[in-house]
Amino acid sequence: MEDNQGQDPNRPGNHGTERSEPVRSRWTPKPEQILILESIFNSGMVNPPKDETVRIRKLLEKFGSVGDANVFYWFQNRRSRSRRRQRQMQATLAEEQRNQQAQASGGAIQYEGVSGGGGSTSSLLGFANSPSFAVSPSYLVGSSSSSGVVGHEVGVVESLFSIPNQMGFQEVEQGSGISSILCPSETSNLQYQTGKQVCMAKLLNL
Amino acid sequence: MEDNQGQDPNRPGNHGTERSEPVRSRWTPKPEQILILESIFNSGMVNPPKDETVRIRKLLEKFGSVGDANVFYWFQNRRSRSRRRQRQMQATLAEEQRNQQAQASGGAIQYEGVSGGGGSTSSLLGFANSPSFAVSPSYLVGSSSSSGVVGHEVGVVESLFSIPNQMGFQEVEQGSGISSILCPSETSNLQYQTGKQVCMAKLLNL
DNA sequence: CTAGTATGAATGAAAG
DNA sequence: CTTTCATTCATACTAG
């Protein structure tokens, strides 16, 4: 078992190390899958209930094998690490502020370039904060499985925009402003390896 | 209570994370302790009463510091995750039955289970599936003296076989049948990290 | 090759 | 009991 992801070698970092990985000991989400997950997460559903998890899993399965547990773990890890980062950033910030006493000129300390400007909490694609958006019962409607074709993801992404907002909306994260999903700032780091993919847009060949 | 496992240097990935935290914040059960706990759980006592918890704690303390709370939590988590696993397995099976499509290979990432398959109730030491074992009121009754094996832990395990057998023994459910403790099927997965220890026998150098 | 990092998975602890 | 949080471990990947 664990035969997931055996049919999509278009990984950016799939350089000459392994040509064909027979079995993967753990789930390695595809870029499209990460996009979907990030979108959902950024749209506010940071903790999907059980039934939603199943729905998300089914969505993700169009791009590669994935189980409910993977989705569950993904959200749990995402939440946890997002919070941790936030906390550390705050701690660092506070410390820097304390240290500023010795710095007369100071003040130009940034961390990740969270130029949070606006209050627009969401996706460049603008689907989550659209008022009339929130009630569609399915994440994805059609979108047949185009397995392996590289240019087709766009259609997939398009058809992705119908996610219900029926979440508890417990925490819409920090006030520094969420930047784009496609080019995330610190708050939504979706690259899952160092420099593996710098930007989601690039990642999907958009 | 924090100085448990003061002799566990086999940390493979000791990446430089902590710079000032020498003590471990949470209890990390030793292999022997896990064996004991699993044995008890598998023998039917899935929810030990208070006094039994104390007794179990005292037993476990022979192999490392542990508190009553740890034992309590362990059983609670064990119960909960066992249930969850079973539920998820049922759901997955039902769904696959409904689908019955062309999905021969592919994703078998399970929720919390590690692909059970083995129906063979085989214990490498052959003490768990002894007919008189499952119904015995003690955790682990005699029948030691299977020595001659290589590990030092054997002695420890042997000394484990002397437990005052006087428990309430309330519930003996788990209708799917108790599998081996040492090489668990999905009903009793005792490895607490993927690949960390594949089998309890291996874990104890047996 | 080795070292470092990001992250999936596991699980102890605790909250609800 | 169920769900969530926090910590830890193992692994996939990148860089050097």
Image (cartoon, coloured by chain):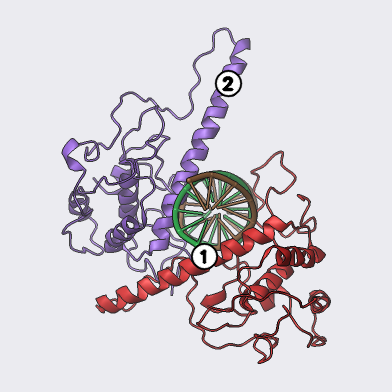
Chain colours: A purple, B red, C brown, D green
Using the rendered image of the protein, determine whether residue A28 is visible from the camera's viewpoint: no
Disc 2 and disc 1: Cα gap in Å? 43 Å
- Please name the residue shown 30% across and 59% down the image: A60
Measuring from the top left, give residue B10's x and y in whole percent. 72, 60
Q: Is residue A100 above or below residue A151?
A: above
Tag 1, which secondary structure? helix
Residue sitting nearer the eye, B86 or A204 = B86
- Please name the residue shown 41% across and 36% down the image: A187
- Please name the residue shown 62% across and 64% down the image: B75
Name the residue type under label 2.
Glu
**Numbered badge on residue A192:** none
Which chain does the numbered disc 2 sit on?
Answer: A
Which chain does the numbered disc 1 sit on?
Answer: B
Left/right placement of residue B204 relative to residue A50 reads right
Residue sitting nearer the eye, B19 or A133 = A133
Measuring from the top left, give residue B176's x and y in whole percent. 50, 82
What residue is shown with label 1?
A: B81
Q: Is residue B136 above or below residue A22?
A: below
Circle nearer the viewer, 2 or 1: 1
Residue sitting nearer the eye, B136 or B153 = B136
Measuring from the top left, give residue A196's x and y in whole percent. 42, 48
Measuring from the top left, give residue B199's x and y in whole percent. 63, 76
Image label count: 2
Instruction: Answer with the quarter of the image where residue B52 lies.
Output: bottom right
Name the residue type under label 1.
Arg
Left/right placement of residue B21 relative to residue A200 reads right
Dots 2, 1 in contact, CB < 8 A: no
Left/right placement of residue B49 relative to residue A187 reads right
Tag 2, which secondary structure? helix
What residue is shown with label 2?
A: A96
Q: Residues within 10 Å of mark 1 (few under 14, many from 20)?
A: some
